[in-house]
Image: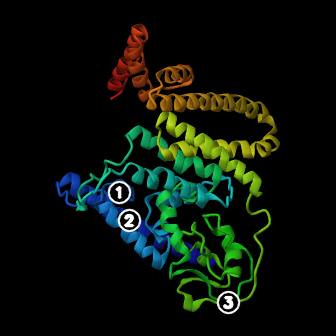
């Protein structure tokens, strides 16, 4: 019976996913094919880039506000039923199970907090810090942003999608982007605590733990429904897989009137999550690696922090890999010997780049030159802003030979970029 309910739920969610993506394709066709450009990009980023920063109400901002309002009734339903990344994850997970590709699973309790930090640091804070001074008139421009203008260049987007959709699930299990990186999901997810409809306990629970095993978002569902009698975690995407898999129909996606309150409190499943100190060390590694590569090479927040997740996973799983694949021990040693120097080198380059940037901004050209020249040999690809700053510094200090060298390197890069296009 549970198997039938799971298949039926999968079909319903697939229909919902396909319906919304048909609407997205229709929108793109109207904009680019017919020239109907009244409704622009429908993207959460518009809430910050235009609405909060520039007082401009765009189609994306309207969409974000409507989703936030609806979330107070149905919680983080958008991620479980309509998100394109969620659709891709569900289809790929289904395919991997069919062809028996084994995915590692690493339940982490602090994933929602990681998403929240990304949301605040990269989206909310810049929208206020970069807001123009003085009074900004309120405007309504629904078509202000072209639908595809917010996307990365094709090659960068393809690499990011490959890492996020294929590589990360192999290491971290189902929906790793939704659990650990998605700022939009967590923005909606914090409404789960107050939403009227959510997963609730409606009958006696046998505490078999099947709901917890089935949850793709690392929520200890069994503990939640037997302590608070519903699932309030910000990670819950209302996919209802826990409801479908319950063998005694103890769960339902419903309003508060259907709650069954049994005064039973159960402890967190032993061994379900990593020990807290180890998980905190895991997230520290993710933060350091992600921050360094995001600022150094401008590869995008999501790709940079995906690399951080993979590096942290590798060092965490190294003892198990060492024992499990004894014939490949030379490979594990070689990977450590490659990864550690690369990360240390890039951390060194990032440190001097940031120090040089701060010194240049403060007008201390001597310190800026010293730090930039230390960073320069350690970069794989030098940031353009560093070359521009060094060009200004060499011009101010009369170092014409170094100024000419920087100019030549910059022009050579521009030629390569044009040849690549």
Mark 2 → mark 1, Cα distance in angstroms: 8 Å
Q: Residue furthest bottom?
A: 257
SS for dot 3? loop
**Are the residues at dot 2 and dot 3 in contact (C-beta closer than 8 Å)?**
no
Q: Nearer the viewer, residue 60 or 12?
A: 60
Residue of label 2: 64
Question: What is the quadrant of residue 44 in the picture?
Answer: bottom left
Lower position in the chain sequence, tag 2 or tag 3: 2
Q: Which residue bears the numbered disc 1?
A: 46
> Under tag 1, what secondary structure?
helix
The vertical placement of 126 against 399, above or below, is below
- Say whether marks 2 and 1 touch (CB < 8 Å): yes
Residue 343, horizontal then vertical, whole percent: 64, 32
Q: Residue at x 71, y 84 (%)?
A: 205
- Residue sitting at x 80%, y 43%: 319
Left or right position of 44 against 9: left
The quadrant the N terminus occupies is bottom right
Spatial separation of the CA atoms under disc 2 and disc 3: 35 Å
Q: In the rendered image of this protein, does residue 344 appear above or below residue 192?
A: above
In the displayed structure, does residue 109 sit left or right of residue 386? right
Residue placed furthest toward the left: 35
Q: Residues within 10 Å of mark 3 (few under 14, many from 20)?
A: some
Residue that carries the numbered disc 3 in the rendered image: 261
Q: Nearer the viewer, mark 1 or mark 3?
A: 1
Q: Residue shown at 52%/75% (left/top)?
A: 8
Q: Residues within 10 Å of mark 2 (few under 14, many from 20)?
A: many
Percent across and percent down for residue 272 are 74, 63
């Amino acid at each position: 019976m549970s198997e039938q309910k799971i298949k039926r739920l999968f079909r319903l969610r697939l229909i919902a996913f396909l319906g919304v993506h048909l609407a997205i394709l229709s929108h793109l066709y109207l904009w680019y094919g017919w020239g109907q450009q009244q409704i622009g990009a429908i993207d959460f980023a518009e809430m910050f880039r235009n609405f909060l920063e520039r007082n401009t109400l765009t189609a994306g901002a309207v969409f974000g506000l409507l989703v936030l309002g609806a979330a107070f009734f149905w919680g983080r339903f958008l991620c479980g039923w309509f998100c394109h990344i969620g659709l891709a994850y569900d289809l790929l997970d289904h395919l991997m199970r069919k062809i028996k590709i084994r995915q590692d699973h690493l339940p982490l309790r602090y994933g929602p907090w990681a998403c929240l930090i990304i949301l605040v640091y990269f989206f909310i804070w810049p929208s206020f810090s970069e807001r123009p001074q003085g009074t900004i008139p309120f405007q309504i421009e629904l078509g202000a942003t072209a639908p595809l203008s917010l996307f990365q260049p094709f090659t960068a987007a393809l690499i990011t999608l490959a890492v996020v959709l294929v590589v990360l699930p192999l290491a971290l299990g189902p929906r790793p982007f939704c659990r650990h990186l998605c700022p939009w999901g967590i923005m909606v997810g914090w409404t789960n605590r107050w939403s009227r409809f959510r997963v609730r306990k409606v009958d006696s629970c046998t505490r078999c733990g099947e709901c917890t095993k089935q949850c793709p978002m690392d929520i200890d569902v069994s503990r939640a429904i037997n302590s608070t009698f519903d699932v309030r975690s910000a990670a819950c995407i209302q996919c209802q897989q826990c409801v479908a898999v319950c063998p005694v129909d103890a769960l339902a996606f419903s309003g508060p009137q259907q709650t069954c309150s049994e005064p039973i409190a159960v402890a967190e499943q032993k061994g379900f999550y990593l020990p807290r100190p180890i998980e905190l060390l895991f997230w520290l590694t993710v933060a350091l690696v992600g921050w360094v590569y995001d600022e150094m090479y401008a590869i995008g927040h999501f790709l940079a922090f995906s690399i951080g997740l993979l590096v942290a996973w590798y060092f965490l799983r190294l003892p198990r890999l060492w024992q499990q694949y004894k014939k490949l021990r030379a490979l594990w040693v070689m990977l450590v010997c490659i990864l550690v120097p690369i990360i240390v080198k890039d951390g060194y380059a990032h440190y001097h780049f940031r120090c040089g940037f701060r010194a240049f901004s403060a007008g201390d050209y001597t310190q800026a030159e010293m730090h930039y020249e230390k960073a320069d040999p350690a970069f794989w690809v030098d940031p353009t802003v560093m070359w521009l700053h060094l060009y200004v510094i060499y011009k101010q200090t009369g170092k014409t030979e170094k100024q000419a060298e920087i100019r030549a390197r910059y022009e050579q890069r521009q030629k390569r970029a044009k040849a690549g296009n």
